[in-house]
């Protein structure tokens, strides 16, 4: 499937309820087979100073089920991701970031990303391809896939990152995330990384640690 990287995606938007001169903007990127309302259910717990915008992925799998890129299985049930679609969705998200910053008349030069699973994979891809556009990355139950990165000379060391994974995750092996964290650190990216005795989900302890990390960052 060829994904149009210049389309405005469906979205949900929670406006700040606490005033600030230039509100930060947080984009929520859901996982494979989910929808924009999934992570948006956490919006009421996030800092009240934020514009929170949840995007819907462009590929409809079934009613209420969407993906950023397709995943297929061979006859031996090995899993394969469509990296070409992943790159197209990466650039599509970047296009939508610019669209929404214009829509809300924001003068912010950088935004934050919170992604789960496939959304976490794309958050890393965005951060490493467009590091000047992004301040904070929160990547949950996903891994860094170098194949989704377009090489550039921008500094990546300034990214503020939180990553987490469940030790008993049956969907994405924790070894994928551990390897990705090592690669990111080799590139000079500082990552606060945590593991939990949990499957492919955001556990209460995971969410608590994420909120503590976010509250300790500059907005």
Image (spheres, helix red, strand yellow):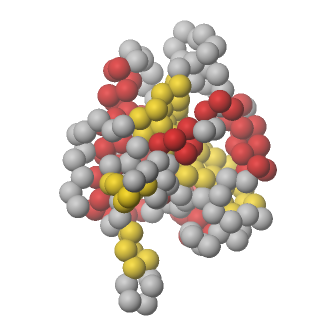
Q: Residue at x 37, y 26 (%)?
A: 100
* Residue furthest out toward the front: 63
Residue 1 vs 132, above or below: the answer is below
* Residue furthest out toward the bottom: 76
Query: Where is residue 37 shown, x and y percent of the image?
Result: 52, 41
Q: Residue at x 46, y 58 (%)?
A: 33
Count how many numbered circles sit on residues in the image: 0
Res 181 visible:
no
Q: Residue at x 65, y 58 (%)?
A: 201
Q: Residue at x 44, y 83 (%)?
A: 78
Quarter of the image with the N terminus is bottom left
Residue 26 vs 123, above or below: the answer is above
Residue nearest the viewer, comparing 203 with 130: 203
Res 52 visible:
yes
Horizontally, residue 209 falls left or right of residue 13, namely right
Residue nearest the viewer, comparing 187 with 24: 24
Q: Quadrant of residue 43?
A: top right
Query: Where is residue 199 shown, x and y percent of the image?
Result: 68, 66
Q: Quadrant of residue 40?
A: top right
Query: Where is residue 89 shown, x and y percent of the image?
Result: 33, 50
Horizontally, residue 132 falls left or right of residue 169, namely left
Query: Where is residue 6 shown, x and y percent of the image?
Result: 23, 40
Quarter of the image with the C terminus is top right
Q: Quadrant of residue 211?
A: top right
Residue 117 vs 35, above or below: the answer is below
């Amino acid at each position: 499937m060829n994904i149009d990287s210049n389309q405005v995606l469906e979205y949900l938007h929670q406006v700040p309820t606490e005033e600030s001169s230039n509100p930060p903007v947080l984009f929520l990127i859901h996982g494979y087979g989910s929808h924009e309302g999934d992570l948006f259910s956490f919006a009421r717990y996030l800092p009240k100073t934020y514009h929170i915008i949840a995007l819907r992925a462009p590929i409809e799998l079934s009613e209420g089920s969407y993906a950023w890129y397709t995943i297929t299985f061979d006859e031996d049930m090995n899993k394969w991701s469509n990296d070409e679609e992943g790159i197209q969705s990466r650039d599509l998200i970047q296009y939508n970031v610019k669209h929404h910053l214009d829509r809300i008349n924001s003068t912010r030069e950088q935004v934050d990303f919170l992604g789960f699973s496939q959304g976490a994979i794309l958050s890393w891809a965005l951060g490493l391809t467009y590091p000047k556009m992004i301040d904070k990355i929160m990547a949950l139950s996903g891994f860094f896939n170098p194949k989704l990165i377009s090489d550039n000379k921008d500094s990546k060391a300034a990214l503020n990152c939180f990553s987490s994974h469940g030790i008993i995750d049956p969907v994405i092996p924790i070894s994928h995330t551990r390897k990705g964290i090592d690669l990111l650190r080799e590139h000079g990216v500082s990552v606060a990384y945590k593991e939990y005795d949990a499957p492919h989900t955001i556990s209460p302890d995971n969410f608590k640690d994420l909120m503590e990390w976010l509250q300790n960052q500059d907005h």
